[in-house]
Amino acid sequence: MPANERPVKLKKCAMIIAVPLTELGYYADLREPKEKKDFVRNIGLFNNYKTEVISPVIRTAKILEAAGVSIFTEATLSDFVRLFDGGFDVIILFTHSCNQLIEFRDGLTSAENLVKHIPSDFSGFIDLSVCHPIDLVKTLDRVLPNAICHYIDATVTPVLWMQYFLFLFKQLIDNPDLTYLKASVIAHHNLRTLF
């Protein structure tokens, strides 16, 4: 059954978080050259970063993990690639992009470099919580014809992404026969009505 027609089980969902979630990680990224790390520079001072990124992401990750979603933090490119052999139907990537490069804990990487490590027979759902991931989407669509790639081509704050995922997974918990695609449409609609 195609991914867009399959009801999804929470235990078959994984969220990989590739931005720093600690003060140590924040300052380590600030010391890196902009060509290797970019995300923390966009938020500003650590107190802002803690309020706008760390707190909402950790709070949401704990809620989703308690519901059965597998959560992976401080993720490298290798961590992301390993999920495709882990039996997951839904893989959510929460990170940052800069000039069409995707940021992981071990640095920025191109879409081409990322997808060359992913098994071409993956037939699940990839949810890119990455601002403006157009190159990555095009590359994933070309290399993974049986997968569904979901994304929003906009700049979205971490707080808004986390609200989106809380809405989405509430739909999946309340309606076990719902597909991930349908739940994401409902979550997207619910968020739009808030703002």
Image (tube, rainbow, N blue to C red):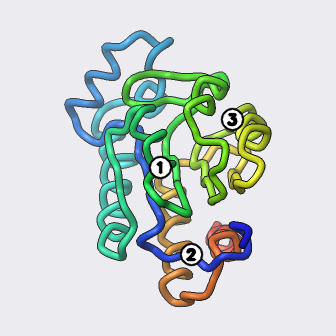
Indicate the position of residue 110 as horizontal and vertical percent values.
Answer: 61, 23
**In the image, is 179 to the left or to the right of 75?**
right
Q: Residue furthest left?
A: 24
- Residue shown at 62% from the left, 33% from the top: 115
- Residue shown at 63% from the left, 71% from the top: 180
Q: Residues within 10 Å of mark 3 (few under 14, many from 20)?
A: many
- Look at mark 1 in the image and give the residue it sits on: 85
Which quadrant holds the C terminus? bottom right
Q: Earlier in the sequence, mark 1 or mark 3?
A: 1
Q: Earlier in the sequence, mark 2 or mark 3?
A: 2
Q: Quadrant of residue 154?
A: top right
**Amino acid type, residue under disc 1 in the picture:** Asp
Q: Residues within 10 Å of mark 2 (few under 14, many from 20)?
A: many
Residue 93 position (above or below residue 10): above
Marks 2,3: beta carbons within 8 A: no
- Look at mark 2 in the image and give the residue it sits on: 8
Q: Earlier in the sequence, mark 1 or mark 2?
A: 2
- Residue shown at 33% from the left, 70% from the top: 63
Label 1, label 2: how far apart the Cα atoms are: 17 Å
Q: Quadrant of residue 178?
A: bottom right
Q: Residues within 10 Å of mark 1 (few under 14, many from 20)?
A: few
Under circle 3, the secondary element is: helix
- Residue shown at 56% from the left, 82% from the top: 171
**In the image, is 84 to the left or to the right of 122?**
left
**Amino acid type, residue under disc 2 in the picture:** Val
